[in-house]
Structure formats: C-alpha cells, structure tokens
Amino acid sequence: MCYCFGKTRMKPLDLNCTIEDISWLTPTIFQLSFKCTPEFDHLPGQFMSIIIPGAGPQGRDLRRAYSIASSPGKALTQLCIRKIDGGPGTSYLGGLKPGSQFKAQAPFGHFVYKIRPGKNVCFISTGTGISPFRSILGSKLFLENRPKNTLCLFGTTNTDEVVYDDEIKKVSDIDWVIALSRSDKSWNGFKGRVTDFLRAHDQEIEWSNTDFYLCGNGAMIDEVKQILVSKNVQKESILQEIYYKPKGDK
Ligand SMILES: Cc1cc2nc3c(=O)[nH]c(=O)nc-3n(C[C@H](O)[C@H](O)[C@H](O)COP(=O)(O)OP(=O)(O)OC[C@H]3O[C@@H](n4cnc5c(N)ncnc54)[C@H](O)[C@@H]3O)c2cc1C
C-alpha cells in the first residue's frame, strides 16, 4: 500500500533495525534509538510498525505501531514507549540491548503536520502521545512553515512522568504547557488534566481559527473532541491518533 502526500509518494519499506541506545526517560517510559537499513523518509507525525517475533497465537509474529519520536533527517530513529506489564510488544522492545536487531516497516499514517497559513495549532497529548509532536516540533516542515501561534499541551500524572521537557521548552515561539493530574504542592504549573486546561482557558483559545492535533489515550481524545464540538470546531480542524481505546470500547 502507498501513502501519498501531495506529490510525495512514500511507500512503506521493510527495515532491518539495529539498536544503538535504550534509555529510561521516566520510571515507565523508555526511548529506543536505532539505525535502519535501508534508510527511510518519513513525514513528522507518522508511525512505524514493528514486528514482535513469535508473540502471537501459535507462535505467529505480532505487529505493534509506534509513532516516530525523532524528526525526519536525523541519523538515529527514536521511539518513546510506555512499558505495559505483560504486554508482548513492550516486553520484547524493552528487553532489547545495544546491538540487538529487530524488523519493522515504515512510514505509515496520515497524522502529519499540515501547513495552513494564518491558522493556530494546538497539539494535545497524554503520556507517550507526545512522540509525534516532538518529531513535528523539531522538523524543517514545522520550523519553516510556522502556524500563527502554537500551543503544545501535554498531560501526565506527576513530574516523574514528564518527557522531553528540556527539549520542547527550547523550541522558540511556542507555548509549552504541562498539565499534571496528580501534582504535589511544589508544582507551579497547571494542575489538572488537559481537558481542565482547555476549559480554564476557554476565552483565550481562538477555537474557530485553530487546528487541533490529538494523540494518545482514546478516552482523553473523546473528551477533548466533545469540548471541540461544543465550540463548533470544524471536523477538518481535528486530527487524531488513538494509541488505545478505553477498556470496554470496541
Ligand atoms: C498509530 C499508533 C501509534 C502508537 N504509538 C505509540 C508510541 O509512540 N508509544 C507507545 O508507548 N505506544 C504507542 N502505541 C501503542 C502501541 O502500539 C501498543 O499498543 C502498546 O505499546 C502496547 O503493546 P503491548 O503489546 O506491550 O501490550 P498490549 O497487550 O497490546 O496492550 C495492553 C493494553 O495496554 C494499554 N496501552 C497500550 N498502549 C498504551 C500506552 N502507550 N500507554 C498506556 N497504556 C497503553 C491498552 O489498554 C492495551 O489494551 C501506538 C498505537 C498506535 C495505533
């Protein structure tokens, strides 16, 4: 299958990947850095599909999708992954060591930065959902085609679970907001969930002139979309990448 972006046609390639580094960014989130052969191009926001060998029924291979957290053109590709207890994909990937090899295909997906002159952009994520936004914020595509204003809103539980703060706060001319749902008293930033932030800043957000990009937990995405619909945000201004659905949803 091919994915077409304007004149660019990016066919997913079969990749052999070799781990260079694995580092724990938080107690539950690790980052894989690796080289791919052949090298591949991607648009910021796209994902890769990783083969988890023998982890499926009757020893068949499984596949797991991961947003590419590094920007296009970097020497190493990076993924930011939450370890799920007993999860076959993250157990396999979390057990890799420098020099380990794995197989993947990339690039996939339509959750990519769209140039819309004069519009604001609001990137909203929870947990590892920050990955595609890290890729976008460091990309030429974004840096050379800035929206009018950029808000990057990231939600997690507490300061221990914050990722990429040092990097993202260095990106010029963006508002970087961390919303902590279980902050302690010493936290000076926003206390609450990303949805609480949107409601609290109702008057400042130009709802009808903003493209909203939502990534992460499906429950968060549903709740944010309810707010956006109540503000008459057009469907074409809402882009989403759902990592997993709330339990019980099909
Ligand atoms: C397009 C796409 C991109 C994705 N990108 C990323 C990414 O960049 N980083 C990442 O960590 N995951 C990402 N995921 C989720 C990933 O594909 C796997 O589902 C996840 O790593 C769990 O795999 P597993 O085999 O270890 O556990 P499984 O047995 O498949 O999952 C067990 C349960 O874990 C929960 N879960 C899944 N993902 C997460 C998560 N990220 N945080 C909290 N709970 C979760 C769900 O309730 C799921 O049912 C993405 C998913 C999609 C569809």
Image (cartoon, helix red, strand yellow):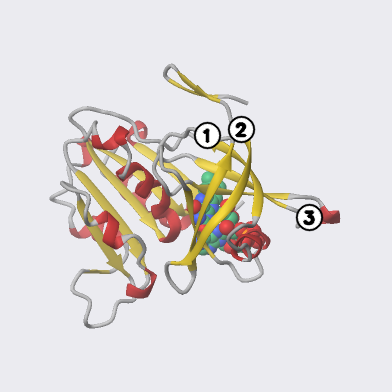
Task: Look at discs 2 and 3 and give the one toward the viewer.
Answer: 2
Task: Look at discs 3 and 1 and give the one toward the viewer.
Answer: 1
Whether tag 2 and tag 3 are in contact, CB under 8 A, the answer is no
Residue 65: x %, y % from top left: 58, 48
Residue annotated with mark 2: 13
Q: CA distance from mark 3 to mark 1?
A: 26 Å
Whether tag 1 and tag 2 are in contact, CB under 8 A, the answer is yes
Q: Secondary structure at mark 1?
A: loop
The residue under label 2 is which amino acid type? Leu
Nearer-N-terminus badge (3/1): 1
Nearer-N-terminus badge (2/3): 2
Residue 146: x %, y % from top left: 21, 35
* Residue 4 in view of the camera: yes
Q: Who is closer to the viewer here, 10 or 40? A: 40
Residue 239: x %, y % from top left: 39, 39
Residue annotated with mark 3: 54
* Residue 248 in view of the camera: no
The residue under label 3 is which amino acid type? Gly
> Could you tell me which residue is drawn at 34 percent across and 60 percent down?
164
Q: Quadrant of the N terminus?
A: top right
Q: Return the mark for residue 40.
A: 1
Q: CA distance from mark 1 to mark 2?
A: 7 Å
Q: Return the mark for residue 175.
A: none
